[in-house]
Image (tube, grey):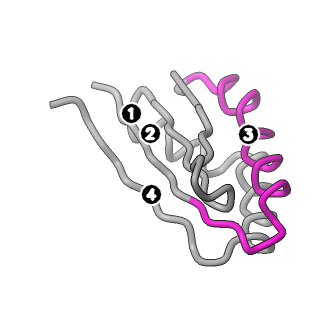
Amino acid sequence: MSLTVIAAFEAKAGHEDRLRTALEGMIEPSLDEAGCLAYDPYTDPNDPRRMVIVEEWTGRDALDFHFTTPHFHHVRDVLDQVLAKPFTIKYLQDA
């Protein structure tokens, strides 16, 4: 059973491009991880400060490993600088 993750972000005003660049920079290294099945960022068409990433993982172990990677630690540092508020994560499993 796979694990779907929806992570939501809101950039500080003027930091939209930096947020988008940071999240897009996570696509390739995340997809290279053995347990990553999908990693897709989206921007809210009505508010470019808001973005989400929809991720699919083989399971919680794969996601937990993702949280230990250098690219995840790098993006966390960037997020600390550009987000207006802490990001949220929702976890979903197949019904």
Tag nearer the camera, 4 or 1: 4
Quarter of the image for residue 19 reads: bottom right
Which range is magenta?
Answer: 9-34
Mark 2 to mark 3: distance in Å? Answer: 19 Å
Give the amino acid type for the residue marked by disc 4 in the picture. Answer: Ile
Q: Would you say residue 76 sits in the magenta stretch? A: no
Name the residue rendered at 77%, 46% in the picture.
71
Q: Report which residue position mark 4 lands on.
A: 89
Relative placement, left or right, of 13 versus 90 is right
Whole-percent x, y for residue 6 in the image? 45, 47
Give the amino acid type for the residue marked by disc 1 in the picture. Answer: Gly
The correct choice, above or below, for 49 with respect to 57 in the image is: below
Relative placement, left or right, of 91 versus 18 is left
| Residue extending furthest toward the bottom | 85
Quarter of the image for residue 87 reads: bottom right
The correct choice, above or below, for 33 with respect to 20 in the image is: above
| Tag 1 secondary structure | loop
Image quadrant in which the N terminus is located:
top left
| Tag 2 secondary structure | helix
| Tag 3 secondary structure | loop
Relative placement, left or right, of 73 versus 56 is right
Q: Report which residue position mark 3 lands on.
A: 26
Q: Report which residue position mark 2 lands on.
A: 61
Name the residue rendered at 76%, 39% in the picture.
24
Q: Would you say residue 11 sits in the magenta stretch? A: yes
Q: Report which residue position mark 1 lands on.
A: 59
Tag nearer the camera, 1 or 3: 3
